[in-house]
Image (cartoon, helix red, strand yellow):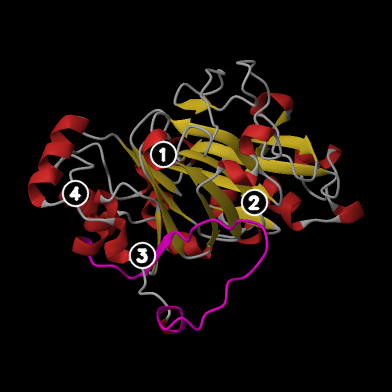
């Protein structure tokens, strides 16, 4: 489940944070290894590695608020312990009343090392139960009881049920919205002024969340979101996230060549701004394997596992791919 919130006026937020003394990312970083401090650590050879994203366990509302105020991504564990959605699996959804929900599945031929653009796939109407059975299938049994999905062998296709507004998806099962609980996160967001205090539109249940369910290899190419910030709860499986600073922040972070991601305006969903795949200004499919999205283009690489929550700051570039057999977030 992913909840997004619109920020207040940036100038107001910055002025407030400056007056309070804005937290630094280093405040949350682990202390250097004692061996490194004593000069006994040896350098290792190999390809450049990504710096580690801050990881915290069961942060308080105050600590969570301070982390949000740094404007940097972080991963928190222990925030989803009371979520009923942590028990959601493809097999479980297929056998529950929630499985009757009608949705749309995007299918692509399996292509290693590439995340296809949304417009390149085939869209198939199915229920969550049918997609759940398809995800659990394999080989010659890939399409067993999969409805319209039966024509697409699980061993040959990647399937993704993405951008699903939970309020609409579970309109006939409103109790499903109570399976998520963002109250802890929203309390911290209010404190850090990412969300206006008392905003009625930011419900703590799933009414402001989207559901993402997919098979290994399913993902979203390089883009940033035009609205505020994202909190991503990984309920099952794992996804690899690659993140880099917003457009215009390259100079203060080491030069224009450090993260050569440039925005384009490829229409799919009005809230997404995709990256160009080269420096010529030509728009094309922005894949994880293309030059503008190679690993060296990204500041952070994060493996988000079940039970963890990722904070994606406003306008940060990100590309996402499922690394487990299936994933639900």
Work out whether mark 4 precedes mark 2 in sequence or the reverse, and give the earlier one. 4
Residue drawn at the location 75% of the way across and 50% of the way down:
134
Q: Quick one: which residue is furthest to the front in this view? A: 39
* Label of residue 322 in the image: 2
- Verify CB contact (< 8 Å) between mark 3 and mark 1: no
Q: Mark 4, residues whose alpha carbon is within 10 Å: few (<14), some, or many (≥20)? A: many
From mark 4 to mark 3, how far is it between C-alphas? 17 Å
Q: Look at the numbered disc 3 and give the secondary structure of its residue.
A: loop
* Label of residue 87 in the image: none
| Residue 281 visible in the picture | yes
From mark 4 to mark 2, how far is it between C-alphas? 31 Å
Residue drawn at the location 7% of the way across and 45% of the way down:
19
Work out whether mark 2 precedes mark 1 in sequence or the reverse, and give the earlier one. 1
User: Which residue is denoted by mark 4 in the rendering?
Assistant: 192
Q: Nearer the viewer, mark 4 or mark 1?
A: 4
The overriding secondary structure of the stretch rendered in magenta is loop
Task: State which region is magenta.
Answer: 35-61
Residue drawn at the location 22% of the way across and 41% of the way down:
195
Q: Which of marks 2 and 1 is in front?
A: 2
**As drawn, 84 above or below 112:** below
Q: Nearer the viewer, mark 3 or mark 1?
A: 3
Q: Position of residue 162 (x, y in %)?
A: 57, 39
Q: Look at the numbered disc 4 and give the secondary structure of its residue.
A: loop
Tell which of 164 and 73 is nearer to you.
Answer: 73
Q: Does the magenta stretch include residue 134?
A: no
Q: Look at the numbered disc 2 and give the secondary structure of its residue.
A: strand
**As drawn, 189 above or below 245:** below
Work out whether mark 3 precedes mark 1 in sequence or the reverse, and give the earlier one. 3
User: Which residue is denoted by mark 3 in the rendering?
Assistant: 79
From mark 4 to mark 1, how far is it between C-alphas? 26 Å
User: Which residue is denoted by mark 1 in the rendering?
Assistant: 167
Q: Nearer the viewer, mark 4 or mark 3?
A: 4
């Amino acid at each position: 489940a992913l909840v997004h919130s619109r920020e207040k006026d940036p100038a107001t937020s910055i002025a407030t944070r400056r007056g309070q003394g804005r937290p630094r990312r280093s405040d949350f970083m682990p202390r250097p290894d004692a061996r490194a401090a004593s000069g006994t650590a040896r350098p290792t050879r190999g390809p450049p590695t990504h710096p580690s994203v801050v990881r915290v366990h069961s942060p308080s509302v105050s600590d969570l608020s301070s982390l949000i105020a740094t404007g940097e991504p972080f991963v928190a564990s222990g925030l989803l312990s009371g979520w009923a959605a942590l028990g959601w699996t493809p097999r479980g959804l297929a056998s529950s009343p929630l499985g009757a929900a009608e949705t749309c599945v995007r299918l692509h031929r399996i292509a290693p090392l590439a995340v296809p653009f949304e417009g390149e796939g085939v869209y198939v109407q199915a229920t969550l139960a049918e997609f759940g059975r398809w995800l659990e299938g394999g080989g010659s049994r890939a399409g067993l009881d999969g409805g319209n999905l039966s024509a697409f062998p699980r061993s040959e296709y990647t399937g993704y049920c993405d951008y699903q507004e939970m309020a609409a998806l579970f309109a006939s099962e409103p109790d499903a919205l109570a399976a998520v609980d963002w109250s802890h996160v929203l309390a911290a967001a209010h404190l850090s002024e990412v969300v206006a205090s008392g905003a009625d539109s930011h419900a703590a249940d799933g009414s402001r969340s989207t559901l993402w369910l997919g098979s290994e290899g399913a993902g979203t190419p390089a883009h940033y979101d035009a609205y505020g910030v994202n909190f991503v709860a990984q309920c099952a499986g794992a996804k690899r996230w690659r993140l880099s600073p917003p457009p215009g922040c390259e100079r203060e972070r080491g030069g224009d060549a450090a993260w050569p991601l440039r925005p384009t305006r490829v229409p799919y969903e009005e809230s997404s701004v995709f990256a160009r795949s080269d420096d010529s200004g030509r728009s094309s499919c922005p894949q994880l394997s293309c030059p503008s999205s190679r690993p060296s283009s990204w500041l952070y690489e994060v493996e988000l596992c079940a039970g963890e929550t990722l904070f994606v700051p406003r306008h940060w570039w990100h590309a996402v791919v499922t690394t487990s057999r299936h994933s639900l977030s």
